Amino acid sequence: MTERADDREGSLTTATEARGLEALISRAARAGKGPAPVDRWNPAFCGDLDMEIRQDGTWFYQGTPIGRMPLVQLFSSVLRKDEDGRTYLVTPVERVGIRVVDAPFIAVEMDVCGTGDGQVITFRTNVGDVVEAGPEHPVRFVDEEATGGLKPYVLVRGRLEALVARPVMYELVEHGEEIEVGGRRMFAVRSKGAVYPIMPAEKLQRLSA
């Protein structure tokens, strides 16, 4: 049976993308040993890659989940979000765009030590980053209009954030307290001397009533 021309073209495209991905993996492996200085690299934009990070933190390539965690961790080490709001995989010689549905990382675990101004909240992400919330890694809370709930984010590096997983969010909120912020009583959490408002205290009281 004769192979249709469009089938051959599709096969060639897939093969070319696969070879391109293998080359990118190779260069990422060399660049990603230790903290990759992606913010100092300024390579040419080489187009978009059919890669997506879904809202639950799962990475997909050409619609198929990437099941190898070491590969996901490798790619995450050369991830960068630029001023244009887009997210890229960056090596010293190339920059390729990928899609991110929400945040590139998920905060899957947290630990709290100390109290008051000395309290430190530490998060671990799904790809193994460990960050202490504070001035260098601020936390922000976003109203989720669809559910009326909250979505907390913690800055991991550069402009890359981790969405705090819902079970971790509940744990985080348990450490909230009423604090005076800018002349207003706020329900907030603290870490490393910084205060992160969750909501006005009166709103919390209404929700608790």
Image: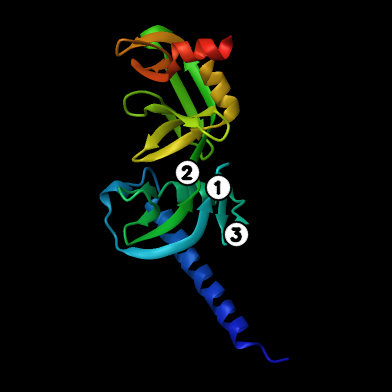
- Up-down relation of residue 208 to residue 16 (above or below): above
Residue 29, horizontal then vertical, whole percent? 44, 54
Task: Identify which amino acid the numbered label 1 is placed on.
Answer: Arg
Q: Is residue 203 visible to us here?
A: yes
Left or right placement of residue 139 versus residue 206 in this view: left
Image quarter of the C terminus: top right
Toward the right, the furthest residue is 1
Q: CA distance from mark 1 to mark 2?
A: 8 Å
Q: Earlier in the sequence, mark 3 or mark 2?
A: 3
- Up-down relation of residue 171 to residue 159 (above or below): above
Task: Identify which amino acid the numbered label 3 is placed on.
Answer: Gly
Q: On the image, which quarter does residue 24 sit in?
A: bottom left
**Helix, strand or loop status at disc 1:** loop
Query: Mark 1 = which residue?
Result: 54
Q: Of residues 180 and 64, which is closer to you in this image? A: 180
Q: On the image, which quarter does residue 60 sit in?
A: bottom right
Q: Earlier in the sequence, mark 1 or mark 3?
A: 1
Question: Badge 3: few (under 14), some or many (20 or more) residues near its Cα, within 10 Å?
Answer: few
Q: CA distance from mark 1 to mark 3?
A: 11 Å
Tally the marks: 3
Q: CA distance from mark 3 to mark 2?
A: 17 Å
Task: Identify which amino acid the numbered label 2 is placed on.
Answer: Pro
- Up-down relation of residue 119 to residue 68 (above or below): above
- Up-down relation of residue 173 to residue 58 (above or below): above
Question: Badge 1: few (under 14), some or many (20 or more) residues near its Cα, within 10 Å?
Answer: some
Query: Mark 3 = which residue?
Result: 63
Query: Mark 2 = which residue?
Result: 104
Question: Badge 2: few (under 14), some or many (20 or more) residues near its Cα, within 10 Å?
Answer: many
**Numbered circle sitting on residue 166:** none
Residue 13, horizontal then vertical, whole percent? 53, 75
Q: Earlier in the sequence, mark 1 or mark 2?
A: 1
